[in-house]
Amino acid sequence: MSVFVGLDCGGSSSRVIAVDGNGAVLFQGQSGAANLSTTPEKRLLRNLTQATKGCPSATYVCGCFAGLIGPETMERGEATLQHLFPEASVRAEPDFTAALYAAPATADILIISGTGSLICSRTAQGIVKSGGRGYVLGDQGSGYQFGRDVLVNYLDNPDEASEALKEALLQQFGGLSENTIVPKIYGSGAPATTLARLAKFIGQDAKKDRPYAIQSIDRNLGALIDVLEHHIRKNFPDQSRFDIVLSGGVWKSAQIFRERLIQLLEARFPSHVFAVNRITQPPLYGAVELAKEMLV
């Protein structure tokens, strides 16, 4: 019987699942980041080797990678998968494809906000996407952007920080001073991933009505809606009702992100109707579905 393996390789963590032809789960694994554009190659291979340790021999493998932005990174992704599963047929896809395949078939638009951000849809012409482009050129409304706001506010107002944030900073950077934190951000090799780990504190501080957190949510979600508006205008010019699915760590970290997104959507598109819900199936299962497609 064929064994299908799906990998969801993100900017913060990587997950692996193997299933048989009946859908029974044979293996699950997890490790660190595997972004093809930002994770150092040795670390990426080490993380995926750890995540797949103990996985049975696979027949078909699909790895969905953050940072897969062109033919060169696709070739690197497939070469990595072939190294991990030398006897399998492999394919590498962008990470958003896994989430899109895991979303309900009725979804019009998928909004991903994890370490990075991206908006995508399945249309009659194929998969279309808007945004992304990484933390230097885009990723509006991403965990990186929210985490950056948390850290900047902390550095400007350290005495106002919660004990929970201070504890997180101590664990992540080994100290609370600017002279300790800033060099480690720039020396981390993956600053977007490092900062995205702090995004949840925006939600916590917004619940306490801290102005910087509320302003951060409105500013960053507003920028994300700018991308969504472009996506709708380009791909759904005559449609006014949308089923939107949310995927990624930002939406899981605090309910206020989804609630405020809905409010901002209603203000921006008064003549449109939006149903906005979080994804119920992990993107990892979308990667498995992509692996199963290889059989056909």
Image: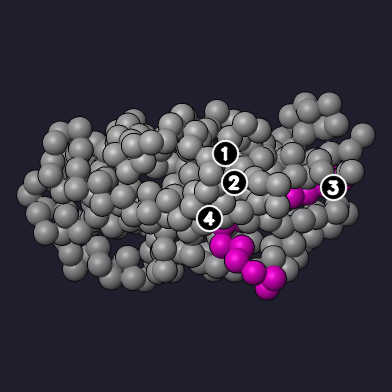
Q: Nearer the viewer, mark 3 or mark 2?
A: 2
Q: Is residue 7 visible?
A: no
How many angstroms separate mark 1 from mark 2 (CA)?
6 Å
How many angstroms separate mark 1 from mark 4 (CA)?
13 Å
Residue 64 rendering spot, x and y as whole percentages: 65, 52
Residue 199, relative to residue 34: is it above or below? above
Specify the amino acid type for callout 1.
Answer: Asp
The residue tagged 2 is 121
Going from N to C along the chain, the mark reached first, 3 or 1, is 1
Specify the amino acid type for callout 2.
Answer: Ser
Going from N to C along the chain, the mark reached first, 2 or 4, is 2
* Residue 154 inside the magenta-drawn segment: no
Going from N to C along the chain, the mark reached first, 1 or 2, is 1
Query: Residue 263 is drawn in which quadrant?
Result: top left
The residue tagged 3 is 294
Mark 2 surroundings: few (<14), some (14-19) or many (≥20) residues within 10 A: many
Which element is circle 3 on? loop
Apparent side of residue 225 relative to residue 76 in the rendered image (left or right) = left
Task: State if disc 4 and disc 1 touch (CB < 8 Å).
Answer: no
How many angstroms separate mark 2 from mark 4 (CA)?
12 Å
In the image, which residues are magenta?
A: 54-72
Task: State if disc 2 and disc 1 touch (CB < 8 Å).
Answer: yes
How many angstroms separate mark 3 from mark 1 (CA)?
25 Å
Going from N to C along the chain, the mark reached first, 3 or 2, is 2
Q: Residue furthest right?
A: 1
How many angstroms separate mark 3 from mark 2 (CA)?
21 Å
The residue tagged 1 is 108
